[in-house]
Image (cartoon, grey):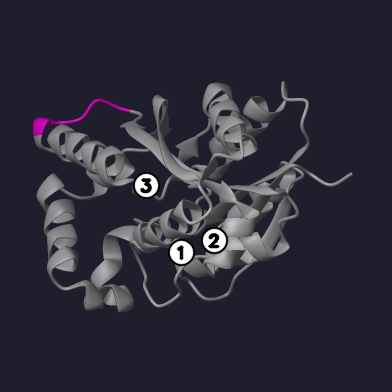
Amino acid sequence: MQPLYSIIIPAYNEEQWVDRTLSTVKKAMKPLNDLGEIIVVDNSSTDNTARIARQHNVQVVFEPINQISRARNAGASVAQGRFFIFLDADTSLSLPLLQTALHYLSSHKCCGGGCVVEMDTPMEHVARKALDMWNWFSITFGFAAGCFIYCLKEGFEAVGGFSEKVYASEEIWFSRRLQSWGKKRGMDFCIIEIPPIVTSSRKLQWFSPFRLVLPALLLMMFPFLLRFRLFCSPWYYRPK
């Protein structure tokens, strides 16, 4: 029986997080009547990410080039569902959020979207303001955060998936193209405000807020730098 939806999780050296993430995903899926599948994309990990994922009896795909957009696209290339949900490996999925996304996609009025983001631990003032600003930006302009993106498979394929020309912000370019595709067909790009997605605040432990904000500002001013992995280190750095 073909699944209705596919949950695609790119993972690079996520052995500390992928077990918890997969547990929340399976818990969220269990009460639903519709069949879904989980695909973990091992993005050239050097730790036990793939082994832990296989212990959950999910499909594991290997993508040798360490690039987030390639990992997302690799998962989508084998996905069988009509609906795609892209989830980060350090992010918890709830049943209400999964139900809301599937409801929107089933309505024939929504081509995809994202949702408001919350962190799993309290944040300092600067970090809180930065997250609030992102959520306002996301709602106002219709841009999905990378930790949770949902869409129609048809729309994903029509816009060519995620751009493999960039090492970060691929979700922004994807949001813009999918919005345009959906608008021509009378469908909206919907940002879910309630419930939010809850993701890890680990980068706030690895970097100071300013070390996260400054690279983001630099990349906004000089977007061509997104083509180089060197300038996108906050998205790829893992502590030893």
Nearest to N terminus: mark 3 or mark 1: 1
Q: Measuring 72% from the left and 25% from the top, which residue is drawn there?
A: 30
Q: Measuring 60% from the left and 30% from the top, which residue is drawn there?
A: 103
Left or right, 231 with respect to 168, comes to left
Q: Position of residue 166 (x, y in %)?
A: 36, 73
Tag 2 residue: 72
Judge whether residue 140 is colored magenta.
no
Disc 3, SS: loop
User: In the rendered view of the protein, which quadrant contains the N terminus?
Assistant: top right
Tag 3 residue: 145
The residue type indicated by label 3 comes to: Ala
Residue furthest right in the image:
1
Q: Quadrant of residue 189?
A: top left
Q: Quadrant of residue 60?
A: bottom right
Magenta extent: 121-125
Q: Position of residue 42 (x, y in %)?
A: 59, 61
In 3D space, how far apart are the residues under numbered discs 3 and 2 (Cα atoms)? 14 Å
Categorize mark 3 by other alpha carbons within 10 Å: few (<14), some (14-19), many (20+).
many
* Numbered circle sitting on residue 68: 1
The residue type indicated by label 1 comes to: Ile
160 versus 47 height, above or below? below
